[in-house]
Amino acid sequence: MSKFEIVTTDDASIAKIPGVIVHNSNGEVSVDQYHHYKEDVNIISNLNFVAYRFSISWSRIFPDGAGKVNWKGVAYYNRLIDYLLAKGLTPYANLYHFDLPLALQQNYNGLLSREVVNDFANYAEFCFKTFGDRVKNWMTINEPKVTAALGYDSGVMAPGRCSKAYENCTAGNSGTEPYIVAHNLLLSHAAAVERYREKYQAHQKGRIGIVLDLVWYEPLTRAKADQYAAQRAKDFHIGWFLHPIV
């Protein structure tokens, strides 16, 4: 779910799991853009910005990851997109930002399963079909390296999987799972892009891509070993996603 959108009580987009957060805080309401989006968009417009990037929550559209549509969630994004356009702002929509529907994690272990590829492509296609008449700039996945590394290597992000040596996870394999997840994320990106290009891009006349984060590395000296080390660091940070795409 968008970091700014967060409110969960209106359309049951997030399952409640009490007892796993300090002081039993639930985070149901933060800045609550869900109800205050017009105020936020007005501020952006008054600052003379020309575009707004937001994330669509997979769980808000499909609470179970697939199947039944939550039309209240769809209505919210329609209102947001329409208001952005009314205020002269170009919408940039991201389809996945660290918020895998819980049901998919429970049903088939989420991003560790190849099944997620088709479910993501179907969700993406629903968004293209529903919002693509107005949204012309699409991003499939935000920072897949963060999901793979922090969720399945160090285990500090959901679903909190890592090897026993980290001593902070109940299950996982930091030597294999990050790469399985990365592969499935790349396949999910490719499947969504293929759907868009084959069925929607020609008449909607939009663009689609992915969001990759990058930390730049420079060699300490001109020595060959340092140059190789810098390139290796860049490959491990961004290359494992960028190279297959380009």
Image (tube, rainbow, N blue to C red):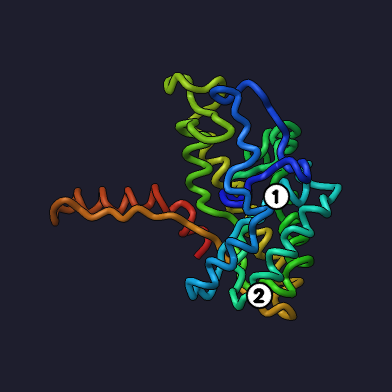
Q: Position of residue 9 (x, y in %)?
A: 74, 40
Give the total number of marks visible in the rendering: 2
Q: Amino acid at mark 1?
A: Trp
Q: Position of residue 6 (x, y in %)?
A: 63, 46
Q: Position of residue 166 (x, y in %)?
A: 43, 23
Of 67 and 219, the residue lying toward us: 67
Mark 2 element type: helix
For label 1, the residue is: 58
Which mark's residue is nearer the viewer, 2 or 1? Answer: 2
Above-or-below relation of 193 to 151? below
Q: Amino acid at mark 2?
A: Leu
First-in-chain label (2 vs 1): 1
Q: Residue at x 72, y 70 (%)?
A: 132
Mark 1 element type: helix
Q: Residue at x 46, y 51 (%)?
A: 240
Q: Residue at x 62, y 66 (%)?
A: 138
For label 2, the residue is: 85
Of 2 and 145, the residue lying toward us: 2
Can you tell which mark lies on residue 45? none
Query: CA separation, marks 2 and 1?
Result: 22 Å
Q: Residue at x 48, y 71 (%)?
A: 47
**Which of the 4 image quarters holds residue 110?**
top right
